[in-house]
Every structure is written in structure tokens, then in C-alpha cells.
Amino acid sequence: MDGSVQDLKADMAAMGRAAREGAKALRLATAEQRSAAILAMAAAIRADSEAILAANARDVAKAKTAGLTPALTDRLALDPERLEAVAQAVADIAAIPDPVGAEMARWTRPNGLDIARVRTPIGVIAMIYESRPNVTADAAALCVRSGNAVILRGGSECLASNLALHAAVVKGLKAAGLPASAVQAVRTADRAAVGEILAGLDGQIDLIIPRGGKSLVARVQAEARAPVLGHLEGLCHVFVHAGADLAKARDIVVNAKMRRVSVCGSAETLLIDRAAAERLLPPIADALIQARCELRGDAAARAIEPSMAKATTADWTTEYLAPILAVAIVDGVEGAAAHIAAYGSGHTDAIVTEDAAAAERFVALVDSAIVLVNASTQFADGGEFGFGAEIGIATDRLHARGPVGAEQLTTFKYVVRGTGQIRA
Amino acid sequence: MDGSVQDLKADMAAMGRAAREGAKALRLATAEQRSAAILAMAAAIRADSEAILAANARDVAKAKTAGLTPALTDRLALDPERLEAVAQAVADIAAIPDPVGAEMARWTRPNGLDIARVRTPIGVIAMIYESRPNVTADAAALCVRSGNAVILRGGSECLASNLALHAAVVKGLKAAGLPASAVQAVRTADRAAVGEILAGLDGQIDLIIPRGGKSLVARVQAEARAPVLGHLEGLCHVFVHAGADLAKARDIVVNAKMRRVSVCGSAETLLIDRAAAERLLPPIADALIQARCELRGDAAARAIEPSMAKATTADWTTEYLAPILAVAIVDGVEGAAAHIAAYGSGHTDAIVTEDAAAAERFVALVDSAIVLVNASTQFADGGEFGFGAEIGIATDRLHARGPVGAEQLTTFKYVVRGTGQIRA
């Protein structure tokens, strides 16, 4: 191991130990202190806007020189308006109810023991993410809100912007009397730093949250030596049941696919009930085509709508994130649920129907984080759920499924109060 | 890869696929059907007692031949009385409230969307455990109660007993119209089967629960490619604060250490507040010595009680599971919390004090799964918490901390009911 590798290892290990101290300070702070820190972070982002925009301009110039696509370059670019939105999003997080210390349940045992299940922070969280500098500010604010220390490792293409935002975050922490160790940023673009985080920094990382493309998340899930809250793809389905109201179905399908095609809650496959496909598919297909959506159908769908391209098996498992929709004809609720079980990602799936029994059967059969009845899959969002802000949508089955807001970034402990009880 | 390895791989993969089907059947069954299956399992264990005891006798004979210690051999031995206790424990699990489908929260958004967070089974659980054949029956019943399919992999020293118990379990499932795939047992002693489970059976395992010694749990946590609900050691502390009632403190300490020394909730370290050590330590030490407990103290403790052996640093991190107690003098609540943070395992820790402010400070500072005030650490038990039965006590921070009962073996999904809402 050469000197620089040893230095990086030592730096990262020190960061882990500092984070543990930061976590203790945040956990023991009052809710008011955490709120004050978040508001001060927002104020510092506004006050430092010139420095942050200058740093961002350097990142953007480097990205252009490096030949990044205009779309990717645009993702990382800030302007005064976008930066103000970042600051406002942080300020909004100060208004989310503080989850730390909330009693989730409380009961008394026959022997008089009083048992309470109380929300506590998870501890030290590591965020590994790509582009979009707003994640730096959002993650810092959500982790402070939930009492967790965080180690931020953003994409190297955005390093200057992230460090400038982080400097403002630290000013906010200090203004509220909280230590800088509560929110730390990795200051090197060296990818070995990610390896150190995945190795767990000597047990100082309690949770790793990857946020970015599928390959990033998959790498983190494969290599991490600490628990991971994974946000994999959103392969969302809308099933239009024979009992659907046509106008509702048409509006929901077009919105689920086309409102924003790049979000994880965007629908990727439309399932139509065979019993009413002749009636339902043509007007829905027309509306989609009018909205400039490309359709790829199975044989039965193409028999009704021959203009569709031919879907292959790959279409059932592709998260297009583009104005393309796969279309399959299925046999009722059972057929829809079987298709979703075979090809879905357990993220968000919807049924459109006026038949309450069919809706409840679909809800029972479909084992996804979010199951919707008569509503667009684009509601898969922490804000729309009333969580105020989210750090992502978890597709794992444990701890937190669905939108991950401040409450989902907590764990709990049992507090047992007695009067001298001993066990027989 | 030779033929037998390929066969094992294929067998285990088939078991994983079958478990997924079993999970679906269990999830969609009614609570009554799951209860009926559990009661039928208990009845079948009673009806098959002769075959089960004969199989167990073969395991015990083999263990003796293999030179297992009498203590270990006793752990795996069944007799009619112990087997009846196994059957009764299963029957008791039928009476635990069924958690599946319970609404954890429900709210309506301003746009009329009705959002419910509903308990659902985790899916497919793999249990990897050592000796004690009762785990086979307990785990089967708890998993059925919580709607999860389970793959059981007990210790090879107990294979015949486990398979005989499993045969009874399958009879119970069938009697209630549930498929045998809901509870499967690995039928080979080949350790490669564990490797296949740790590799996740092609993504068919949603959760691995190891139950056994520290090395088994550590191996599973290190190698598993699926989430693990780990139960590591219980390095429990009792802190006697200067404000403690002496009689309560003495009774709690003796009970916490000596009631049963082999359980994870047994205390391993006694912390005494320096401000009152001269008053508190001698009578507590006397009571422990009278109960035949060996004491190992730090310098300050030995200055008060010179009869104690000398504690080394290793004593602060040793789960004795024996009548031995380490004793340290600490400076108040902060000193106790610092000792626990440095050496504890985050399992269960207690304070004894009549000073309410000190108690609350201890509760805030100590970040363990269970924090007790004025009660014995031996209450760290799902039964004592009112959970009816437990599959272990989780020392991880996520999903389920503390006792893991039927409710803790569930996850949740969001059910969103609308009337045609689309997102703006």
C-alpha cells in the first residue's frame, strides 16, 4: 500500500470516527436546535450564492471540456433561480415535524413494567450519489432533521459545487451550536473513497444510501459491508380493469406515463384487461399517441391497435424513462398481478376500476411498496405522501419501503420503566 | 463443478422457487387459516411424538459417539416433557394476533387520496440455526403466523430431529389447506447448502435470520447476499447510580446476572457510580458472592472490595454467559454511558436510581435496543414484552431492534385509494 492510499484510508477512518461524535451531538440536540441549524443552512446557502454559483460554473466548464452530454451537463448546472429553490427546499425541511423521541407505542405489562417504543436516529448515514448538487443540501437537511450524522460523497463531476454547498451547510450547523462533524463531505474525487465507505469505516457507518443510476445502486448493494437502503428502478404498471371508467383510465394512464417520463414513478407498462380490451385500448392508445408516446404492444394488443410496434420480452423489464410505453393484454386481476410479479420491480403499481372487489383483490395480490387504486403512479413521491421531503423511494422490503422521508430515517429503541421488577 | 455440487445447487434453487409460491399462498391465506395451520402443527407434533423422540434419540446417540460435551448433548435432547413444551409453544403462537393486513397508519391528502400503511409479510425467510430442535417448530409457527414462507436449516447434529419435527409441521400445513412449500427444511447435512442460502437462492430469499453462536452469526453477516436480521451478543450492563435504592439495586443486579447466566439478557458488567461506590458496592458484592458469582473489578472497585479478581480490558467486552461479573467504577450517568458506548453491544442496558432526571439522562444517552430503568436486564425477552413468542433479539439498528416476534417479521406497503386523481 503506497502512502497516498494509506493517507486516504486514514482520512476516511477519521471521518467515520468524527461522524460518530457528530451523530451523538445531533441525537442529543433538541428539536428546536435541529430546526435552527436547518434554517441557518438555508440562510447560508443564500448568503453564499455567489461562491456556490462560481464553483458550479467551474464544474459545468469541466463537464463541457470532458464532453458530457448537454442533458447531463444541464443536470448539474445551477443558476440563481435553481439555487434559490435548493435553499427553499432546505428551509422547508425545517418545518417537517421532528421525528426523534416520538413514542411509536407504549403499554404496561401485568408486572407493572411500562414499555415504550421510541423513535431514535439511525446514527451515521453515508450518502453516495451522482450529479444534481441539490442532493447535497437535501440530504444534509433531512439527516439533521432526523438526528443522523451524514457523510456525503457526491459525483466527481460536481465536486466543486458540492463542496461549496457543504461549506454553507457547515456554517448553518455552527450557527446553531452543532459540530461540523454532523455533516461531512468527502473532499477528494478519488474513487477509492467510495470503496472505504462501502467497507464501513471500521463499523462507523450504520446505513448507506445510494442515489443515482442503476449501476451505482447495484454496485453499492453488491459490495457494501453495512446495511443499504436501496432505490432501484421503478418499473411501474397501470392495469386498466374491465370495470374501469374509460375517461378516468385514459387520464390516469396518460398522466402516469407522460407527466414526467424521467421520474421513477412514471409508468412503463400498460396492462389492459382482455375482457374489455376492444372497448378500452383504442381510445387510451389514441390519447397516448396524441401525447407523443410511442407504444409497443404484445400480439393481442397489436391485433386491436395494429399501429403499435412489436414488444419483445425486454420491453416488460425496461425502465424507459422516456415517452415509450409497453402494452400487454392480460386476463383480469390475476393476470395483471402475475405479469407484475414476473416483471415488476416492487415499486409502484396501479389499478383503474370502478369494481371495488377487483380493486381489493389487486391490492391483496400485488406486493409492491405502493399500490394505487384509481390514481396516477406519478403520486409515488414523499412530498405527495405528505412527508415534506424525501431522500428517495426504497425498493428493498425491509425497514423503509416506499418514500424515505425524515421519519423513515429513524429506528427505535425500547425504554422500559420499572419500580424494581426482577424476573422470576 | 462436479455432479453432486450441481445437484445441490439445483435442489436449493428449486427450494427457493417453491418458497416463493409458498409465500404467496401464506400471504393470501386468511388469519383463521394461518391459525388453523399452527394449531394443526401442534397437534401433529403431539401425534407424531413417538417418531420425533426416536429420531432425536438417534441424534443424541450420534452426538455422544462424536464426543459432543454433555452440555451440548443435553441441549439437543428431547424427552416427552420437553416435546410437549415444544408442541404447547407452537399452539400458543396460534393465539398471537395475526399481524398481516393490520393498518399501521392511514391519512387523507388534500387532493382526496386516501393513504394507508398496511402490514404485509416479508416474503421468504431463511433460518440458519444450531442445536435445540425446538427452534424448528418455533420458527415454523412464527413464520406462518406472520405470513412468511420459511426455509429451515438447522444444525447437522440435530438433522434427524429437525426433519421429524418438520414432517409434523407439513402435516399441519396440509390439514389447513396450505402447501408444504410454505415451510421447507434442508434435508442434507452438507454445509454447502448454507453457502447457497447465503448466496440468496437467485434472489428468492428476502431475509436471513441466523440463530446460534457468535461465529455462526458473524459468518452469516459477512457472507450473506440478502438482508440479515442479526442477533449478536448481549453484552448487558447494569449501572447503579448514586441515587439508587440499595435494596432494589441489590435485587436487580443479582437477578440480572444470576437468574439465568446463559441467556443474552444476562448482565455481564456492573457499573457503580463513584459518588456512592463506598456505600453501594460492598452489600451488592456480598449478595453476588453469596449467589456464587465471581467478581472481576477495576482498580477503583478493588480498592473497595479487595477480594475481587483483577479485571482486564477483555473483561469489558466478554459475554461470559457464566456466573462471572465485571465491575467498574464510573463517574455518574455520563461515565456509565461512555463505558456502555465503548464496550457494549447495543442489546440491553439498565440504570437503577430513584433520581428521575438521572434516569431520563441515561435513557437519552444510552443508544441500545432496550434501555431499562429500575428493572432487571433479564426482561429482555419477547414473551416478557408481551409479544407472545420471539425468534431472537435483534442487535442490528434497522427494521427490527430488540425482541423479534410475529409483528417484527412483517414489512408494510402503502395502499393509496383515489377517485381518478392525476398529478399536476
Image (cartoon, coloured by chain):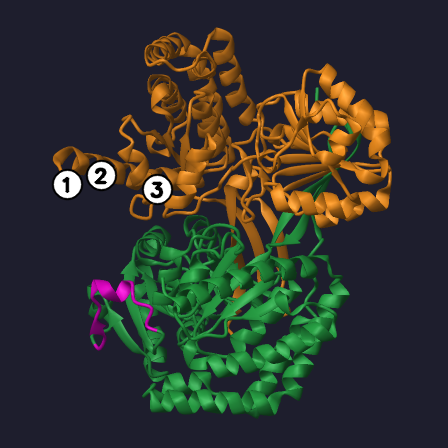
Chain colours: A green, B orange
Label 3 to label 1, Cα distance in Å? Answer: 19 Å
Q: Which residue is mark 2?
A: B9
Can you say which quadrant of the picture contains the N terminus of chain A?
bottom left
Looking at the rendering, the stretch of residues picked out in magenta corresponds to A307-320
Callout 3: chain: B
> x and y percent of residue A33 in the render?
75, 67
Give the residue pinned by disc 1.
B1
Q: Where residue B155 appears, x then y in whole percent?
A: 37, 25
Describe residue B105's horizontal placement relative to residue A419 as left or right. Answer: left
Is residue B149 shown in magenta?
Answer: no
Residue beneath the point at 54% across and 35% down: B233
Q: Looking at this view, is B141 or A98 the one in front?
A: A98
Q: Earlier in the sequence, mark 3 or mark 2?
A: 2
Residue contact between numbered discs 3 and 2, judged by CB atoms under 8 Å? no
Decide if residue A371 is on the left or right side of residue A322: right
Which residue type carries mark 2?
Answer: Lys
Front-most of B351 and A212? Answer: B351
Name the residue that disc number 3 marks: B198
Horizontal and vertical percent for residue A124? 57, 58
